[in-house]
Image: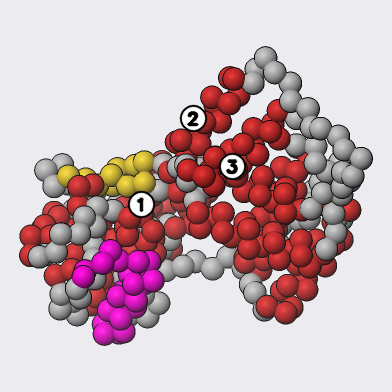
Amino acid sequence: MNEKFITEVLQLAIGCWNLDHTQCKQFDCGLRILLQNYEIKECCTDIMDIEKSYIQYLQLFLVRKKTEGKSDRTLEQYQLHLSKLLQKLNKSLDKITEDDLFLYLAWYQKTRNVSNTYLDNMRLVFSSFFTWCNNKGYISKNPTIGLEPIKSEKKIKKPFSDEELEKLRRVCTQERDIALIEFLYSTGVRASELIALNRSDVDFIGKSVVVFGKGSKEREVYLTATASLHLKEYLNNRTDDNDALFVGLRKPNKRLTVAGLEHIIKDLGKSAGVDNCHPHRFRRTMATNVLRKGAPLEEVKELLGHTKLDTTMIYCSISRDNVKYTHQRLMSA
């Protein structure tokens, strides 16, 4: 009962004071220390509803995930998919079966025409929620245990070629845009990470930038001499007083949004004749190129801010020519 009480108090605290990840952790720890010598019991009433609404458990789950450092975007996806599922099934949690989830996924794919990759991400959300409910004792059986991963075709997403990068550089008419391109390519940061950066996060002497990535994890990324030069020129020529590292060109020069960044890169791609041009492709290009030039996979993982090496491999496309050359070099007599 203490666990449920702590989660509910955390939910209330987050709602009242908008606590960040670090504050949530500290509050959670303090509550647990305080309640070590206490046992919390829920009051019983004659009118108590035996089958409590799923909304209560969903909110508790989201609070717990927030304290674990999940991003707001991830929490939104959790709430979106779980709310739709639970509303569609219209059952109490302990009566939801594996067949219910399987049929819902099949129905969703048919009506929404989503990819297998998207559908498997939904399955992972369901698994996380029902596994948590089962571990906490809110349901007696986890209905997602028998749900197999949904296979999808593994397509190698190509990085920019050297020629494509040069084409993008040549169509830049604003110092901000060339600074953006060089910054994205040099650091390999996510779009959400870039728009959150401030001028003070950049160390031009050490040519490094402090980034807060997924799960509020801090890491250091690095600027090439070219990226550093263009970024410095862009910042020196700005006349606004916005702390944001990158802003819009029109007054009042607001901080760039993810959508705004994507629009800028897409337009540059159209002008340069480069297809499939988006911010995340620079991340993949950086990772692939440093790996090709001999960087250990572990170091690339740190640059990208990944937790697992498997995730890093998704971003790193190695050409067959590189593999062939390495084999010949290592296997030659």
Mark 1: which amino acid?
Answer: Leu
Please, what is the dominant secondary structure of the magenta stretch?
A: helix
* As drawn, 19 above or below 286: above
**From the viewer's perspective, is the residue at label 3 or at label 2 nearer?**
3
Which stretch did the figure color magenta?
252-273
Disc 3 on helix, strand or loop? helix
Q: Taking the image as drawn, is residue 181 in sight?
A: no
Dot 3, how many residues are within 10 Å of its Cα: few (below 14), some (14-19), or many (20+)? few
The circle on residue 113 is none
Q: Position of residue 307 (x, y in %)?
A: 48, 43
Please tell me which of labels 1 and 2 falls first in the chain: 2
Q: Which residue is mark 1?
A: 291
Q: Taking the image as drawn, is residue 21 in sight?
A: yes
**Residue at horizontal 38 percent and vertical 66 percent from the top:** 258
**Residue at horizontal 37 percent and vertical 61 percent from the top:** 191
**Residue at horizontal 85 percent and vertical 54 percent from the top:** 92
Q: Which residue is mark 2?
A: 26
Disc 1 on helix, strand or loop? helix
